[in-house]
Image (tube, rainbow, N blue to C red):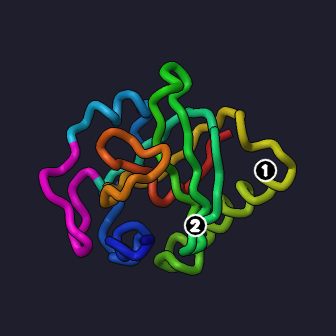
Amino acid sequence: RGVERWSVKTLSDNRPIDTNYIETTIHDLNLIPPPDKIYYNTTRLKLEEQTFAITCKVIEIRTEKDGDLHLIVADTSAPFETMIFEIIKPSQASTQYYKQLKKVRDKIVYLRSKKKLIGKTFTFVGVAFYDLPHNQKGKSLSNLELHPVLKILP
């Protein structure tokens, strides 16, 4: 796993992204129905042009085979509702996002090393992305993720 819809989830498809983020919750995003059909090579969908800011609690982090840092996060008001946020390797994305992604990755790596990540609440801004269902731990009801995370708000 990891390579499906690669150009979409790494922003290397060079399609425009609306960086004027919408503040929302995991609960509210879970109310959005998933697309009817999504395939290995599905191009960017309309919702995947949008960025969202979500305040949530980090409950788990792990390193994926593709090098992404895979965060499982929970809604602060509905902790049983979870979602996946991906912190990608900056070198895998479009060069226009490199500095932004490096800043996020460096901060997450630092917080992880200082044990100041798990159980803590943060506001993440990232691009909506529909992953293909493959029994991911912590996935949202619609397989919607923030992939990649573009910034962490103070």
> Which residue in the rendered view is the most extreme toward the front?
135
Residue type at the position of mark 1: Leu
- Residue that appears at 44% across and 30% down: 25
Q: Which mark is residue 64?
A: 2
Disc 2 marks a residue whose amino acid type is Glu
Label 2, label 1: how far apart the Cα atoms are: 18 Å
Q: Position of residue 48 (x, y in %)?
A: 30, 56
**Which residues fall within the magenta stretch?**
34-47
In the picture, the disc for residue 72 is none
Question: Quadrant where the C terminus lies?
Answer: top right
- 126 lies above or below 69: above
| Local secondary structure at mark 1 | helix
Numbered badge on residue 111: 1
Q: Is residue 78 above or below residue 67?
A: above
Magenta region includes residue 60: no
Residue 40 painted magenta: yes
Q: Position of residue 36 (x, y in %)?
A: 12, 51
**Mark nearer the N terminus (2 vs 1):** 2
> Residue at 84% across / 55% down in the picture?
113
Closer mark to the observer between disc 2 and disc 1:
2
Q: Position of residue 127 (x, y in %)?
A: 41, 54
Badge 2: few (under 14), some or many (20 or more) residues near its Cα, within 10 Å? few
Q: Position of residue 90 (x, y in %)?
A: 59, 73
Q: Identify the residue at horizontal 35%, vertical 56% (top origin).
A: 129
Q: Residue at x 64, y 45 (%)?
A: 60
Confirm whether residue 53 shows in the render: yes
**Element at label 2:** loop
Which of the 4 image quadrants contains residue 38?
bottom left
